[in-house]
Image: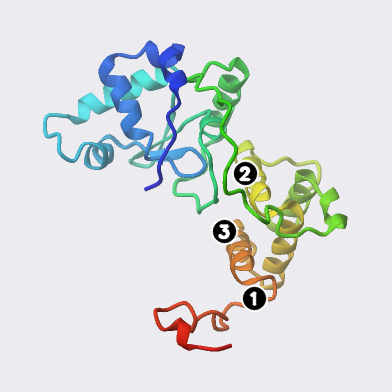
Amino acid sequence: MPNRIIKESIWTSPNLNQLSDLAERHFYRILLLPDDFGCCELTPLVVKGRCYPLKSDISIENIDTWQQELEDNGLIIRWNSGSRQYAIFPSFDKHQRIRSLHQRKTPVPPDEVITRIEAISSSDSTCRQMPANDRPNPNPNPNPNPNPNPASSSLSKEDVIEVYKKEIAGLYEEESLSEIIERDIEATINIFSAAWVIDAIQEAVSRKNRTWHYVTGILKNWKRFGKNYVPGKSDPDKYIKGKYGHMVQR
């Protein structure tokens, strides 16, 4: 489970300070649940087991009441899928540092949830954990752009979306993607660059696997082994990573 950031601006957050004490505590406990897209499962029984394993006095009714209070104050937006309850933290990407993008763990929010997220974002009232003046990273990424080719620097998110719509989603140019999918694409571009994402999409198509999960898998392998990496071949560093690696010569 990932760590999450809590900023000192919670002391003056209008949304958080309107909560009851127990609902505010609940917010901090479930803040560890979201995936890299700000989504998580909030089925009360699941939350009780994960967030309150040592508190037998907490009931399912307590959890449902607190989550309703959080939603009433715009801190989460919930939706149901079958018998399970899911939620998204509307301004999650503004307050958390996502250093690497992992696979989505929950269903993509439905359109009505995305509409509510846009309304909350435009009002700019959610949580108000405004980004602080963070200290410079003392160990910056020595190669933030894995594809430093100047010719590729002109590629943008719009170029990636156009290729994605054509090759992965099978949409016409005038059709649009959902807000959540666009955020997924933007987060991936920030990690790997637009040029690499387009190359990975084309590679996925050539392997006849037109899924976004497969595209991100290609990107992760390229970042680790280089763009010449081919699935099924041995890891080039297989024999030098173990505890006897110092005894092996290339």
Residue under label 2: 181
* Residue 43 location, quadrant: top left
Q: Position of residue 153 (x, y in %)?
A: 82, 51
Taking the image as shown, residue 48 lies to the left or right of residue 155, namely left
CA neighbours of label 2 inside 10 A, class few (<14), some (14 to 19), many (20+)? few
CA neighbours of label 3 inside 10 A, class few (<14), some (14 to 19), many (20+)? few
Colour scheme in use: rainbow
Q: Amino acid at mark 1?
A: Tyr
Residue under label 1: 229
Tell me the number on the disc at residue 94.
Answer: none
Q: Earlier in the sequence, mark 1 or mark 3?
A: 3
Quick one: SS at disc 2? helix
Residue 19 vs 218, above or below: the answer is: above
Q: Earlier in the sequence, mark 3 or mark 2?
A: 2
Q: Position of residue 33 (x, y in %)?
A: 37, 40
Q: Earlier in the sequence, mark 1 or mark 2?
A: 2
Tell me the number on the disc at residue 213.
Answer: 3
Taking the image as shown, residue 227 lies to the left or right of residue 54, namely right
Q: Amino acid at mark 2?
A: Ile
Asked whether the residues under the numbered discs 3 and 2 touch, taking CB atoms below 8 Å apart as contact, a structural biologist would say: no
Q: Position of residue 26 (x, y in %)?
A: 30, 27
